[in-house]
Every structure is written in structure tokens, then in C-alpha cells.
Image: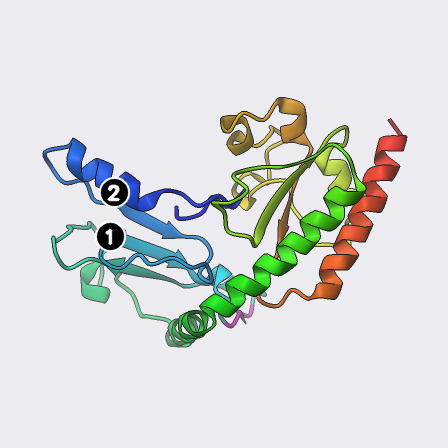
């Protein structure tokens, strides 16, 4: 995983790959999952397998007759040294035998176009998201005491902001800010009431782990939305703390 999907910290992928290649006699393939496609990251030549999900690439969303979003992904496999991959399903041998089945052409074309745009706008998007994310954090932390930014302040993707608000339950914050799309953890753990294992792993105590909120800033986020979110967050944190 290039970037942790809860706290936005960049992982030392190249260092991990180098460590694996020098510590074992048999070369161990590096399987890299790209979380945010509009992040400045060059994986060419350094990894064996790279896969990405179009969900976070701003690709066109398609809905079927059952009102379900249709998804698509991409897999990159390095030619040399060769990596052997067993298929998840067998069938007609499409995609060089790795993934049999008819390719959903509209989805694949949409993902390709999204990746092309992401490459063209990479630096602009990154700078813009950095400015907006810093604006959000500064507004909140200048008005509310006892707020902790989770994760490394420098080695991070700016569009994933995770803040812990002391003395406030994360679930209470989500209910108070129900008109804003926020989360108290990853979608993978949305059904769990346990504190984030990521926050516990980096040393956060249980109370702060329970009080964390994840904010997302992306290509289409506006300055007005950032200001609105910050103002609402400040209001609700103060209100919830007064109720203690």
C-alpha cells in the first residue's frame, strides 16, 4: 500500500523492496496497492506487481439496473524479472490468463482516461490539495485546543487528513456533522466499534483513537467546502465538549 488509507502516511515502498531483495536469497515479489492515483509517486522499475482500484481515480461512475456502482481495476506485472501469478478464476483465458471473462470496455476506457488526466494534472492537483488540506487543519487547530493530527506531518498524502479531538467521541462527531461526508476510520472497518488498529499501532491511546475523524480533500473539493467543514467542525466540537 503506497499510502495508508486511514492517516495518509506514505509508506517507504522502495526501502522495503530493497530490504527484501538483500535479506533473502530468493527474490520476494513486491505487490503494491495504489490508494490515491493523483499522488506524486513513481513506481516504474521498482516493483513487481502494482494494482489500483478505479474508485479513487475520478473515473466515470456507472450504475447498473440494480442501482449498484460498477467497478474496475488495473494490474501491472513487471516483465523482468518474471513474476508468476496464479489466476483467481479460470475460463476463456482473457487478460493473458490472469483474469478470464469479458472485459467491461466502458469501464476500462474510463479508467484509462482517468489515469491519463491524473498524469497530466498530477503536480497541479497535489499542490492544490496541499493548500486546501493545510487550510482545513489550520482553521480547526487554531480555534480548538487538544486536537492531534495523526501520522507523520511531512511524509503524507495531504488529501487524507486524520484528526483526533480529545474529549469527543468520533461517532458523536459523525452524527453532529451528518451533512458532511466524513468517516471515523476506513470503509474496511466501518462495521467495527473498536478503535482504529492503525492509530493504536502508531501509539495513540484508546481515547484519542476513539475520537478520530478522517477528512478527504480531492480534485473537486472547493475552498468554500473546506471553510464550511472547518466552521461546522469547530462549532460541534465546542458543543459536544460543553455537554460532558
Query: Label 1: how many residues lie within 10 Å, few (<14), some (14-19) or many (20+)?
Result: some
**Residue pictured at 85% horizontal, 45% vertical:** 235
In the rendered view, tell whether residue 103 sits above or below residue 78.
below
Say whether residue 204 is left or right of residue 146. left
Q: Residue at x 23, y 36 (%)?
A: 19
Return the mark for residue 241: none
Task: Give coordinates of residue 75: x percent, y percent.
Answer: 30, 59
Whether 182 is drawn above or below 171: the answer is below
Q: Can residue 59 be seen in this snapshot? A: yes
Magenta region, mostly helix, strand or loop?
Answer: loop
Mark 2 falls on what kind of element? helix
In the image, 209 versus 133, the foreground residue is 133
Q: Quadrant of residue 180?
A: bottom right
Q: Residues within 10 Å of mark 2 (few under 14, many from 20)?
A: some
Q: Is residue 92 visible?
A: no
Residue of label 2: 17
Q: Quadrant of residue 225?
A: bottom right
Disc with the residue nearer the chain's start (2 vs 1): 2
**Mark pair 2, 1: CA separation:** 8 Å
Residues at marks 2 and 1 touching, judged by CB atoms closer than 8 Å = yes
**Residue 64 on the magenta span:** yes
- Locate the C terminus and report the quarter of the image it occupies: top right
Left or right, residue 47 beside residue 38? left
Which labelled disc corresponds to residue 46? 1
Whole-percent x and y of residue 230? Answer: 76, 51
Secondary structure at badge 1 equals loop
What is the span of residues highlighted in magenta in the rendered image? 60-65
Confirm whether the magenta stretch covers residue 134: no
Position in image of residue 222 (x %, y %): 68, 66
Amino acid at each position: 500500500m503506497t499510502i495508508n488509507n486511514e492517516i495518509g502516511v506514505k509508506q517507504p515502498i522502495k526501502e522495503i523492496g530493497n530490504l527484501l531483495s538483500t535479506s533473502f536469497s530468493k527474490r520476494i515479489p513486491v505487490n503494491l496497492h495504489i490508494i490515491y492515483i493523483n499522488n506524486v509517486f513513481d513506481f516504474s522499475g521498482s516493483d513487481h506487481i502494482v494494482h489500483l482500484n478505479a474508485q479513487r481515480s475520478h473515473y466515470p461512475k456507472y450504475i447498473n439496473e440494480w442501482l449498484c456502482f460498477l467497478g474496475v481495476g488495473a494490474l501491472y506485472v513487471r516483465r523482468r524479472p518474471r513474476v508468476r501469478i496464479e489466476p483467481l478464476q479460470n475460463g476463456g483465458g482473457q487478460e493473458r490468463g490472469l483474469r478470464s471473462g469479458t472485459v467491461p470496455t466502458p469501464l476500462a476506457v474510463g479508467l484509462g482516461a482517468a489515469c491519463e488526466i491524473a498524469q497530466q494534472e498530477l503536480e497541479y492537483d497535489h499542490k492544490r490539495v496541499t493548500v486546501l488540506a493545510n487550510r482545513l487543519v489550520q482553521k480547526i487547530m487554531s480555534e480548538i485546543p487538544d486536537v492531534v493530527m495523526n501520522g507523520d506531518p511531512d511524509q503524507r498524502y495531504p488529501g487524507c487528513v486524520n484528526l483526533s479531538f480529545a474529549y469527543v467521541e468520533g461517532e458523536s462527531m459523525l452524527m453532529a456533522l451528518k451533512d458532511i461526508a466524513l468517516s471515523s476510520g476506513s470503509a474496511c472497518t466501518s462495521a467495527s466499534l473498536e478503535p482504529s488498529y492503525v492509530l493504536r499501532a502508531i501509539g495513540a491511546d484508546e481515547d484519542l483513537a476513539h475520537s478520530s475523524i478522517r477528512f478527504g480533500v480531492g480534485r473537486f473539493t472547493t475552498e468554500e467546502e473546506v471553510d464550511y467543514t472547518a466552521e461546522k467542525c469547530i462549532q460541534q466540537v465546542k458543543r459536544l465538549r460543553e455537554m460532558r
